[in-house]
Amino acid sequence: MRNDREQVFAKYQAEIHLLGRLGLALGLGLLLALPFAFGKMLNAGVNWPAFWKGAAQLLPVYLPSCIVEFFVYVPMMGAGASYLGFITGNMVNLKIPCVVNGRDICKPRDAMEKEIVATLSVAASALVNTVVLAVGVMCLVPLTPVLENPVLQPAFNQVIPALFGALAYKYFSQSLKITIVPLALMCVLCIAVPSLIGSVATLMLGSGALAIGVAYLLWRSDKL
């Protein structure tokens, strides 16, 4: 029975990788084709020197973040959810919380069930996000006076911190011995050097390595 289940999971993974790679290739092709299509319609060419100059300034900032996100998110979400998530975007503020909540609700027993739950969670999130965006675009003009109300602006600025604060507390509270040192250090660094707040990828990588080190020391001392 177990071997049959493993064979089904292996077949599922192979099909997911095939469809995921095709989807990523198609999405990347469409993403790159759109500006060239607009340029062709408007008879406007690409200023390649300006393009490479801008790329040289942006790549050092975003490339490390992309690499870190790949190594962090893929093991957390699984193949199917990662393909969908990277195509549709909003990984941190939508897809990952949906995966976490989906697994908490369904309580999957093994890797195959975790993979399926994560994929369905991201798919549902992408569909709901598309519907919400469509409704938002249609209601944007009528709701503009409300959205631009100065009284509501502080609330909009706290949406992401509130989301991640609630999500982080759940995991921090389960392993305070591991999280207290990295969390305290990151808080001190961001307060002492506010410019580090923009270096999320570097801080994520450093705090993750520190958390692994603390967990290893606690495990060696039988205090975990």
Image: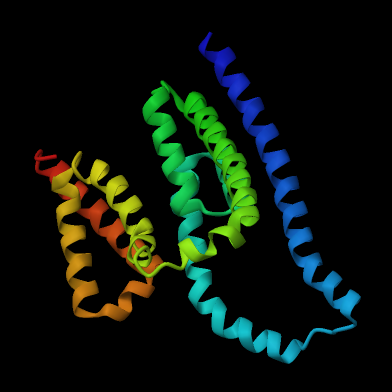
Q: Is residue 64 above or below residue 212?
A: below
Q: In the image, 18: left or right of 83?
A: right
Count all numbered tags in the image, as a single digit.
Answer: 0
Whether residue 194 is visible here, answered yes or no, is yes
Residue found at the far top of this picture: 1
Q: Which residue is drawn at 41% across and 30% down?
A: 103
Assign the C terminus to one quadrant of the image.
top left
| Residue at image point 73% right, 47% down | 23
Q: Is residue 79 visible?
A: no
Instruction: Name which quarter of the figure residue 219 lies in.
Output: top left
Residue 70: x and y, percent? 51, 55
In the rendered view, does 25 fall on the left or right side of 146? right
Indicate whether 196 appears above or below 137. Answer: below
Could you say which is closer to the camera, residue 130 or residue 126? 130
| In the depicted structure, whether residue 61 falls above or below residue 115 | below
Rendering coords of residue 90 (x, y %): 52, 54
Colour scheme of the rendered structure: rainbow
Residue visible at 15% across and 46% down in the picture = 176
Q: Residue at x 79, y 66 (%)?
A: 34
Image height check: is 51 above or below 9?
below
Question: Where does the image place residue 221, in percent across and percent down from the top left?
Answer: 9, 43
Q: In this view, does 29 lie to the left or right of 72?
A: right
In x, y percent, where is residue 127? 62, 40
Residue ranking furthest to the bottom: 49
